Image: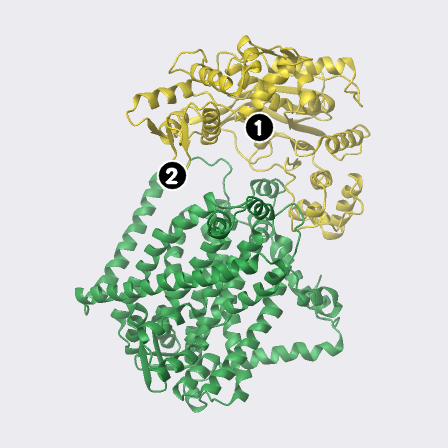
Chain colours: A yellow, B green
Amino acid sequence: MLDTSKEATLLDIRSVCRSFPKGSGEELLVLEKVDLTIRSGEIVGLLGRSGSGKSTLLRIIAGLIAPSSGDAKCRGETIAGPPNGVSMVFQSFALFPWLTVLQNVELGLEALGVESAERRKRALAAIDLIGLDGFESAYPKELSGGMRQRVGFARALVVHPDLLLMDEPFSALDVLTAETLRTDLIDLWIEGRLPIKSVLMVTHNIEEAVLMCDRILVFSSNPGRVAAEIKVDLPHPRNRLDPTFRQLVDSIYARMTQRPEPKTPAIEGIHGTGVGMILNHVSSNVLSGLIETLAAPPYNGHADLPVLAGHLQLEADEIFHLGESLQLLRFAQLSEGDLMLTDAGKRFATMETDARKRLFAEHMTNYVPVIGLIKRVLDERPSHTAPEARFRNELEDYMSEGAADETLKTIISWGRYAELFAYDEQSETFSLENPH
Amino acid sequence: MTLDDILTPRLGQALRPNVWDLVALILYGGEQTTLPLSALDSTPVSLDPANLPLYALRTTMRMLLAIVCSIVFTFVYAALAAKSRRAEMVLIPLLDILQSVPILGFLTFTVVFFLNLFPGQVFGAELACVFAIFTSQAWNMTFSLYQSIRNVPKDLEEASQSFHLSGWQRFWRLDVPFAMPGLIWNTMMSMSGGWFFVVASEAITVGNTTVTLPGIGSYVALGIEKQNLPAIGYAILTMLLVIIAYDQLMFRPVVAWADKFRFEQTASATAPTSWMLDLFRRTRALRALTLPFAALNKAISNLHLAIPGSLKVPVRSGPPSRVVDALWLAVIAVATCYAGWRAYQFMSATLSLSDVVAAIGDGFITLARVVVLIALASMIWVPIGVWIGLRPKLAERVQPLAQFLAAFPANLAFPVFVVIIVRYGLNANIWLSPLMILGTQWYILFNVIAGASAFPSDLREAAGSFHLRGWRWWIKAILPGIFPYYITGAITASGGSWNASIVAEVASWGDTHLTAKGLGAYIANATEAGDFPRVVLGIAVMCILVTLFNRLLWRPLYAFGERRLRLG
């Protein structure tokens, strides 16, 4: 941590942990011993994969959930309930659809009991600042996504918070709108026109973090921890094409694709281990398409992730999911921000549909422990059927219900594609028979 | 905004008499209720059609009073159930039971209760009537509000927390607006359903007590007694006018107004419209009338009610204590057993097992009627509804008519059918049955129309281009497409039919009494004889049958439709 600056400390988080109950009733740790200090005058980014607990941390700071252990202080006071002087911008905007733009913006002041003339004055000033003039009496549903998020910003700024929290504020917007809003916000920030002292933003977009933040905390997953702290010294406005900028982005990509530490369950091809692996749902079609793209020029089996993400117009988070799925199935290898096809992956690219299915089935059974388990159970049982609940219970020993859902969804869709087993949605059973 | 601002005559002078007229009418209607019960005998209901407007006013007043009670009840009950987990454990199952109790069976007890509460006053009888309507309206409204509050989007919840809205503010600024469209729709449906019960409960006989409250229902009852068919016609005509007025002046404006609360981020293609609402929005004088309500709403929602520290939901919420839960469950179980034991004692004092068998037997006869009638109504209205629904222009015109017919109290028309049965000497067991579904079949029609209208045009085109015709088209395309809608309509129709059986299985015209064997007749006869144990038995059997019927048939069908056949 920096100790040179003597500016006021707004936020002080000391070894905060947070766990949630798992499906099996035990606790699942999502945040482990996180430290974070925010001083006046900086924009700090929390960067990480989905499920790395960064949104949980933001909600702890916002006073919406409490830490399981550790100490969270805002302006010297322990956070219990939403602290004064902190306001939040939501990914989904969270505007009240039955209130007009002006009423939405006034809401926070109303709750504080600000007198009505003053309220109106401040709300109009915030609307004016954020470029919403003329939309005061519109309802949110009449606005485009970008305009709605501007309302979200105006609503957060109008209470003149010391600390502005932003939960992936641009990720629900299209590329162009998001970029405009980012630059508008940064312009206001460097001109000193925002009535705030500091910003804490959560994002999974690496370029966005490098573009906006003075300091980036990179989170690792399972459980969420601060893996690295990166200082961004580039002057504003930053240029995405600037070589230093690109270098920084590349290095963060590399850091985030580092081989997982032994924390995650072993995924060696031995049956019975690593059943607790969370599988993110990725369609087999997308995987095939990605393998074909990787095999073809200009990549010829080897791609730089940021380049690939740009080409396919995918968020960093999505490209990581895809890359990891391929890596899990041994069709590709992730390292240092690069994605390389394995021999099996190269063969897959040249195959016909039926051969692909066979290869996919083989890799699935061998390398995804839980699928191997399902196959084995189905083979062993005389009826060749097994209820979904049997595997769900096993998964929930390791993960939350939501993650178990996602994992089962993935297993079912991959299994169906590879014709490894059938699944009946109504009776929720796996079977070896395919309908004739 | 101060009180002076509202009261100083911003309203145009010409408009004033109208407002005060309304107040005078309400006062007059209210004053009548405080008269002693004997006044009802000295000024008996008369068949003079000139009295009908006043009777209609009295009937409408009862409706409005009941809906106000229902709304208050809904807010308190649903808020409690949604905000307190332990209250929820009692309140929601209780609501589920109340929902399946035949309301007209209730009447027996409530009339006695309220008459004893205000001995010798019209007020007691009025309250009994209002309470009967209330019981027909409140439950689905409460369910709707409860479910909406439980489903408030997480991000809005977090936003209101992080902007420091108090619990009270949150309730009025977030929970209630979010629940508004569903609540309004259910309220309006309840109002529509309520006409049936107001008519049925204005003239009641329980044992030796006969209460006749001036109103359209008692007018019809007298018409039946006096065998006066033209009077029945006048009553039907009056009711039609009242419901048209209700539809145009209340239902449509309120539904159109509530459109702004619909929780969706994109503007809808067709918003409901109402000339009345437009009038209010565009006329300054009328708009001024609404200002006090807006100010009141704002004042209520901004009240800074300090919540005692102990009630505040702690942020650091560990898992709820299982010991307390277990204790709480034990208390509930004991209370339930005790209530069951008391009911059993009450009945077993005079009733034997053969009575139970008889009631169950009658129950199955009524069950058979309901099943056959729903099947018949479906065979008639599903094809017609589909035909109409697939023609948007026509559907637009027929849909309000079907809703209107569903609101019309079918029991007003019963005498017309009874006259025919009496005149041609038809078998009451068969021919009284259709009366049960007379008023409720329209739910099937308008839901099927809604389903067919919502059937995606690309699916229609696909069916056409694959030459799907005849039976195949019905079974593969349209019937699955409208299934969820049809089930919603059929559930409503079946519930309504059970209720209607109590007034439909027994009918009279002058001195001629017709009875169709069934549980409805069983309850109606026991009520008239003041035989409380049998009434309790009849109601209990009906409750159980309705609940079983819902659980074993409708719920699975509904779940199936929602899971597999919901489009989009």
Image position, residue B520 (x, y; %): 32, 69
Give the crowd class for mark 1: few <14, some 14-19, many >=20 residues within 10 Å.
Answer: many
Chain on which label 1 sits: A
Q: Quadrant of residue A321?
A: top right
Image position, residue A430 (x, y; %): 38, 29
Give the crowd class for mark 2: few <14, some 14-19, many >=20 residues within 10 Å.
Answer: few
Residue situated in front as seen by the camera: B51 or A155: B51
Chain on which label 2 sits: B
Q: Amino acid at mark 1?
A: Leu
Q: Is residue B181 left or right of residue A176?
A: left
Residue of label 2: B321
Report the number of discs. 2
- Badge 2 element: loop
What is the quadrant of the C terminus of chain A in the image?
top left
Q: Are marks 2 and 1 on the same chain?
A: no
Q: Quadrant of residue A257?
A: top right
Mark 2 vs mark 1: give the one in front: 1
Query: Most extreme residue toward the top, as rendered?
Result: A343
Residue A12 in view here:
yes
Residue at 49% x, 59% y is B383
Residue of label 1: A57
Q: Amino acid at mark 2?
A: Ser
Image position, residue B80 (x, y; %): 46, 52
The answer to whether A29 is drawn above or below residue B477 in the figure is above
Q: Dots 2 and 1: beta carbons under 8 Å?
A: no
